[in-house]
Image (cartoon, grey):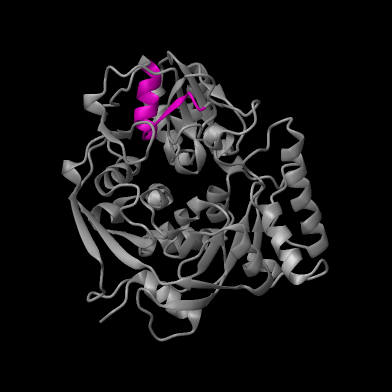
Amino acid sequence: MGMTITEKILAQAAGKDSVAPGDNIWVEANVLMSHDVCGPGTIGVFKREFGENAKVWDKEGIVLIPDHYIFTADEKCHRNVDVLRQFVKEQDLPYFYDPANETYSGVCHVTLPEKGHTRPGEILFGTDSHTCTHGALGMFATGIGNTDAGFVMGTGKLLIKVPQSIKFVIDGELDANVTAKDIILRIIGDIGVDGATYCAMEFAGSTIEELSIEERMTICNMAIEAGGKNGIIAPDNKTIEFVKSKTDKEFKCYESDEDANYSSVYHYNAEDLKPVVAMPYSPDKKGNVADLLDYKLDRSYIGSCTGGKIEDFAMAAKVLYKKSVKIDTYIIPATVEVEAALKELKYEGISYMDIFESAGCIIKPPSCAACLGGPVDTHGRCNGSEVCISTTNRNFPGRMGSKESKTILASPLTAAASALTGFITDAKL
């Protein structure tokens, strides 16, 4: 019996010829990422278990990216970043994206591939559930807790159970107004938020092959919303070209064997997929946009690791071109690099940034911002009983601020089209 791509990567990292679902194996990590929310806790575990003067297992393998609560007056948030800053100084770590200077980047899950920290065939652990994003580049990437991260920080190893793999095959050509976000929301709606618990969600098929790297990232990002251990897409020429443009480090590509064993396989025809949203308060509460056109909104939010990439804003710019929004519409680039692209890239001769400004959008600096709620002065934070349509990835009560608010998950196309009407709206490109 052959192995899946996830099993092959884990076998290589464990120094084994083969592994099978359920095996408990020690794997060697390539990268450990943490941010301002979980970094201090991870550092605390590391120092408690290995000693105040202990050194990390590999300075090149640690990446610290403050991004969640950056633009705030909250002193506790500032303290968290100070803890990271002090640790970086003590350990002489090379990869710290400090909000206090020009190294600041923004959202961790967009920064990692931008800066060349994600490579096919490798193991990436991150203290953030959406670390599964990076499986879009053909690696095993998963979120872990502070305790595990502290252990990885000291040893470079982690004991994990090999997950079963579920395969999702999407074939055919998507309609112009159907995006990667619609694909993953449809899948999560079909299998439920526990439908892939501790499983590797592998995405394949001609539709996936046609998607850009950024759109693939959107799909893998939300594997955790179905309970997945990781999301993954086999690397192809697009992947290799992208990664080589970001780093000169060597890497190895893997793909699943034809006789690999999957616990289940789902097939979708792209022509059958429509624009969808996830209604409050769960990512699997799927609804077709066409059936919800009378649902009133107070706010639109375009940003986050899921919906704040360059191509996400390209979609929004196409919809908002020469139009005006009717509700508060936040534009929050994921990273500084994305922000710069919005000023340079154009639609019909006008920069994306100018299109957003002319449409009356509220533009804020790169960060996670309201995706995780945050302090009261967080950009885009929902107040009271506001209803927000958002390109983010999670819509539990209080996720974007007030517990009385409601978040509706949508694609950038749907979020932008809805901003123009104040109701859930189909972009109809």
Residue in the picture at 43% in, 37% down: 312
Residue in the picture at 23% in, 74% down: 258
Where's the N terminus, which quadrant? bottom left
Query: Percent position (x, y) of residue 187?
Result: 28, 47
Residue range highlighted in magenta: 403-420
Is 406 colored magenta in this rendering?
yes
Residue in the picture at 32% in, 33% down: 277
Where is residue 19, by image quadrant? bottom left
Residue in the picture at 31% in, 72% down: 256
Query: Percent position (x, y) of residue 14?
Result: 49, 80
Where is residue 3, by image quadrant? bottom left
Tag count: 0
Camera-side residue: 189 or 269? 189
Q: Quick check: 146 above or below 57?
A: above
Tell whether 155 sits left or right of 247: right
Tell whether 76 sits left or right of 199: right
Is 323 colored magenta in this rendering?
no
Where's the C terminus, which quadrant? top left
Q: Quick check: 161 above or below 188?
A: below
Camera-side residue: 425 or 211? 425
Query: Percent position (x, y) of residue 21?
Result: 35, 74
